[in-house]
Image (cartoon, rainbow, N blue to C red):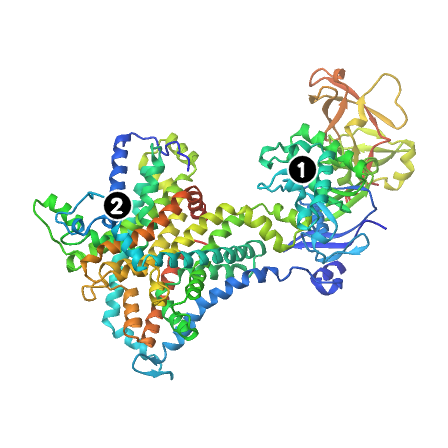
């Protein structure tokens, strides 16, 4: 986003005041994350020290080593597979659906509204029947089970977001492709997907993060084979204080990838949010 | 006149070789999505609906039609209504705070500020964390002995403080709400920042020239301009608040007792701990009904054309 | 065999009846321009020919084959769009080659064809540039290149020059004309600009409200318009229309204007208008068929009148003046130094041999 001319020229907060406010806010929002990070690097003595240690003496990776040794760290891998695959599938299916809705007005207003309103579906209301269904199919504690669920749950959002981006593609590009020699299918892949690149990235990031951070579905639909990092973190709850380190370390392992992804794709995201939000 | 009838009977009057190609393309490409959505969206609804009229639980497996038995129980279930109350309280407090705080932050960062990019990147952190991790983090922060929060309060109070944030009935709600606001205000902030950035400057400049004061401009021009976006953000955030689960699960698991049990937690308990299948289905249905009403009301009231 | 034959075509968009019964036959190699005011259905007609819209009734035949239900890609056509429709993420070479690639043409052949088309349009040096690095005129050439490269049977142009500035438009117009001379493909060109129509077309098809008002060679339509609409559409500045009545006076047929002035009709046309005596008509005279009267007698079929100059608009080589006639203001073309200032008296010579009379009820030329 480019800096704007002041929206309102008014005598009021001087730059210093604004800076102070900005710093205060940043401290408030960042401190907890900082705390989580440093706990993961602290020794047990430092963690359970009163008064709290604000700044660790040294960075210890012992806690992380434990996680890797115990195989707990592999849960991040599970999260990656589940979130990654479901995001890709959701992006493809959702964009195709959005294309159908935008260019062909398939199913009219009603279909579009139905699809997008599915986003409102509260997970808690559907998780139980789905659980029973999965038991019936034998899909509990399976990769494909959660992937299907995440994909389905992400579809309304993807469709909603991609609708706006597809509307922005000049239709002459598609028409020209049709005349030049493309079938409808080719137009979709050779013109629409490339043109919607920015939107695809932005939406994909949000979709991925949603699946990555999910807890409820993972809790209900997995047992021992397929554990995501979110569920794994809760395995360390239980009042036993010496698990704090594990909670922190596991959380960090699961959070750093997201920070990294968001940071690198920041440009797209900001544009993505503003376009998505403004379009509605 | 012959022409008009030819058009009205378009298909038959043409009698040409072949049919419109790609007629079905639009259905083929949307079919997989619809199929998945039916699976996720429609099936559970239907199943819940059917089962809620039966008597299936851990103890019995009576699938005969039992009428509105479960729904009757719903009304008598104090714990259920308590959980709805808890949910309402959390939503009613957190949502406005997130909105106002987000708006203030957006306004703060709207004008040029050196290092703005950096600030914004940092401020976004809470939102991208998993809610369960956020809850876990604040649980560590709130710890009565080793948590920094008590330490900081102790500085102001002049003596050591060992508040039991996750257990003390007077403190659990502030704890939950604080964590929730911490995590999701940046979300509102981002959306509102984008919306404010898109407000047509010529509108506000014209008003300034006309002599309108700051507040007037803000209320009469800026707010209406960003209202559509704000409404959607409120709707999304509001629904998420009603469904809140992870944060509470991490902080208090609905406790102490059932003091912080929201509707989601209650439903979970009923379904996965008590295995009251039919009853849970009825509760789930109630939840869906409630949410549908809220959403429809909200959409209509906000004047959003969906 | 006609390259394109349209019979009884109708196209509706909901309540809007965009094309109402069009019959058109275009022989191979001809440059046809579909022209008319906005909303007349010309773009719809073009898009229906291309297959981007489906006709509600009527048939479209390309090369003798009915193509109503044939996909655009299989109709053997190429199209140039108003907004160029270049793919921003591909360079010029890839843009031109796009259609060939989609049809899985061999790489060697693609290369040969692309370079040949680029040569023809003088854009060989731009092949690895991206569209955003090109000027408007260059982009237009790339769009045309993409059309040429496929050796299609029919070329369709949808207002390709509308987005260019005036000077560029003139240049590109010549380019397109030259292109047609060089490759001789049947071309159908849509525009709202009557100058483009006049200069480019072998045949003009003038459309109004979804129907063909008149078609023929440019000079045909210009000199022998069939209706008031055609007469007023072609020619710049517009033809003047003055209400009048056909009268019999002094043994000859003439016109009486509303302000009392009388004009004698040319002997050649008196026969034609004899039946119209007593009827109200509209006199159509083009500005260029009027001039400042020279000394000496009127030529055959010319009429003279005295009037006062209202407005003067010089363009350099010609000057247009407005003066009152028959209750309305009328524009005439005179030499730059024929007039001095508004309010001056002036004698105008009208060439009624070239004028038309229009029946106000049917708007057809008598």
- Tell me what residue is drawn at x 29 percent, y 46 percent: B100
Give the numbered dot on residue C86. Answer: none
Q: Which chain is home to disc 2? A: A
Residue occupying the far left of the picture: B159
Q: Position of residue B31 (x, y in %)?
A: 54, 63
Left or right, A59 with reference to C32: left
Q: Position of residue C332 (x, y in %)?
A: 76, 25
Kindly indicate whether the residue at mark 2 contacts the one at mark 1 (C-beta within 8 angstroms). Answer: no
- Tell me what residue is drawn at x 38 percent, y 43 percent: A263
Give A271 or C319, whichever is nearer the viewer. Answer: A271
Q: Residues within 10 Å of mark 1 (few under 14, many from 20)?
A: many
Left or right, C199 with reference to A238: right
Q: Quadrant of residue C319?
A: top right
Q: CA distance from mark 1 to mark 2?
A: 55 Å
Q: Residues within 10 Å of mark 2 (few under 14, many from 20)?
A: few
Q: Would residue C77 be visible to someone looking at this image? A: yes
Q: Nearer the viewer, mark 1 or mark 2?
A: 2
C230 w.r.t. B27: above or below: above
Left or right, C102 with reference to C268: left
Q: Would residue B244 be visible to someone looking at this image? A: no
Label 1 element class: helix
Q: Which chain is home to disc 1? A: C
Give the numbered dot on residue C142. Answer: 1
Left or right, A89 with reference to B129: right
- Tell me what residue is drawn at x 39 percent, y 53 percent: A209
Q: Position of residue C295 (x, y in %)?
A: 85, 16
Give C139 or B85, whichever is nearer the viewer. Answer: C139
Residue occupying the far front of the picture: A69
For label 2, the residue is A34
C319 w.r.t. A245: above or below: above
Label 2 element class: helix
């Amino acid at each position: 986003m480019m800096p704007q001319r002041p929206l309102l020229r008014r005598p009021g907060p001087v730059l210093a005041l604004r800076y102070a406010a900005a710093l205060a806010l940043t401290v408030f929002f960042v401190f907890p994350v900082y705390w989580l990070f440093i706990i993961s690097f602290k020794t047990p003595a430092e963690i359970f020290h009163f008064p709290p240690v604000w700044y660790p003496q040294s960075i210890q990776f012992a806690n992380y080593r434990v996680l890797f040794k115990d195989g707990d760290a592999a849960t991040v891998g599970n999260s990656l597979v589940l979130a990654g695959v479901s995001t890709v599938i959701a992006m493809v299916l959702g964009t195709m659906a959005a294309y159908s809705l935008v260019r062909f007005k398939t199913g009219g207003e009603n279909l579009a509204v139905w699809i997008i309103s599915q986003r409102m579906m509260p997970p808690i209301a559907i998780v139980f029947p789905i659980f029973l269904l999965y038991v019936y199919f034998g899909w509990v504690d399976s990769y494909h089970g959660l992937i299907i669920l995440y994909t389905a749950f992400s579809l309304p959002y993807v469709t909603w977001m991609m609708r706006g981006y597809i509307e922005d593609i000049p239709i002459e590009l598609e028409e020209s492709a049709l005349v030049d020699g493309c079938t409808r299918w080719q137009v979709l892949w050779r013109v629409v997907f490339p043109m919607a690149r920015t939107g695809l990235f932005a939406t994909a990031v949000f979709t991925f993060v949603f699946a990555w951070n999910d807890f409820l579905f993972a809790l209900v639909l997995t047992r021992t084979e397929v554990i995501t990092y979110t569920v794994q973190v809760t395995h360390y709850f239980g009042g036993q204080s010496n698990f704090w380190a594990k909670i922190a370390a596991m959380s960090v392992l699961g959070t750093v990838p997201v920070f990294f992804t968001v940071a690198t794709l920041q440009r797209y995201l900001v544009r993505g949010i503003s376009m998505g939000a403004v379009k509605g | 006149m012959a022409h008009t009838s030819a058009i009205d009977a378009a298909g038959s009057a043409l009698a040409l070789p072949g049919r419109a190609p790609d007629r079905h393309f639009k259905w083929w490409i949307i079919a997989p999505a619809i199929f998945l959505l039916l699976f996720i969206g429609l099936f559970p609804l239907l199943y819940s609906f059917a089962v809620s009229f039966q008597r299936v639980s851990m103890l019995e497996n009576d699938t005969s039609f039992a009428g509105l038995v479960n729904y009757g129980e719903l009304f008598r279930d104090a714990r259920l209504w308590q959980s709805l109350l808890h949910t309402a309280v959390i939503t009613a407090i957190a949502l406005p705070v997130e909105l106002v705080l987000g708006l203030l932050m957006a306004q703060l960062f709207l004008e040029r500020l050196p290092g703005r990019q950096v600030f914004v990147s940092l401020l976004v952190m809470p939102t991208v964390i998993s809610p369960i991790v956020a809850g876990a983090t604040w649980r560590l922060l709130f710890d009565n002995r080793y948590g920094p929060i008590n330490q900081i309060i102790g500085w102001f109070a002049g003596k050591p403080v060992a508040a039991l944030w996750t257990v003390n009935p007077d403190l659990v709600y502030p704890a939950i709400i604080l964590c929730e606001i911490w995590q999701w205000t940046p979300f509102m902030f981002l959306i509102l920042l984008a919306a404010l950035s898109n407000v047509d400057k010529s509108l506000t400049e014209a008003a300034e020239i006309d002599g309108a004061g700051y507040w007037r401009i803000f209320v009469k021009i800026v707010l209406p301009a960003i209202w559509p976006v704000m409404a959607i953000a409120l709707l999304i955030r509001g629904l998420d608040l009603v469904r809140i689960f992870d944060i509470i699960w991490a902080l208090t698991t609905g406790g102490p007792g059932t003091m912080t049990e929201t509707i989601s937690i209650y439903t979970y308990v009923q379904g996965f701990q008590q295995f009251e299948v039919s009853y849970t289905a009825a509760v789930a249905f109630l939840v869906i009904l409630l949410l549908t009403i809220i959403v429809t009301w909200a959409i209509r009231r906000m004047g959003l054309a969906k | 065999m006609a390259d394109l034959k349209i019979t009884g075509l109708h196209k509706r968009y909901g309540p809007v009846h965009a094309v109402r019964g069009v019959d058109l036959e275009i022989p191979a190699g001809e440059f046809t321009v579909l022209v008319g005011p906005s909303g007349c259905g010309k773009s719809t007609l073009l898009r229906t020919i291309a297959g981007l819209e489906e006709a509600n009734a009527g048939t479209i035949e390309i090369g003798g084959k009915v193509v109503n239900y044939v996909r655009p890609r299989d109709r053997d056509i190429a199209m140039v769009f108003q907004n160029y429709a270049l793919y921003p993420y591909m360079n010029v070479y890839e843009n031109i080659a796009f259609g060939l690639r989609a049809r899985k043409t061999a790489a060697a052949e693609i290369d040969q064809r692309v370079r040949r088309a680029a040569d023809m349009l003088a854009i060989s040096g731009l092949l690895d540039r991206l569209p955003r690095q090109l000027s408007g005129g260059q982009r237009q050439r790339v769009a045309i290149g993409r059309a040429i490269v496929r050796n299609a049977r029919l070329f369709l142009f949808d207002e390709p020059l509308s987005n260019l500035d005036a000077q560029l438009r003139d240049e590109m117009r010549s380019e397109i004309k030259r292109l047609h001379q060089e490759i001789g493909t049947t071309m159908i060109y849509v525009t709202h600009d009557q100058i483009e129509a006049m200069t480019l077309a072998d045949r003009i098809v003038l459309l109004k409200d979804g129907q063909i008002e008149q078609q023929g060679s440019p000079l045909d339509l210009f000199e022998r318009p069939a209706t008031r609409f055609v007469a007023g559409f072609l020619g710049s500045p517009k033809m003047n229309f003055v209400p009048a009545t056909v009268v019999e006076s002094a043994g000859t047929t003439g016109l009486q204007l509303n302000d009392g002035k009388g004009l004698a009709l040319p002997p050649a046309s008196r026969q034609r208008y004899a039946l119209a005596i007593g009827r109200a008509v509209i006199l159509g005279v083009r500005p260029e068929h009027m001039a400042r009267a020279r000394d000496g007698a009127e030529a055959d079929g010319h009429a003279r009148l005295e009037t006062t100059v209202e407005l003067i608009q010089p363009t350099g080589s010609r000057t247009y003046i407005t003066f009152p006639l028959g209750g309305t203001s009328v524009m005439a073309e005179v030499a730059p130094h024929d007039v001095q200032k508004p309010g001056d008296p002036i004698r105008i010579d009208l060439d009624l041999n070239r004028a038309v009379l229009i029946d106000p009820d049917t708007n057809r030329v008598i």
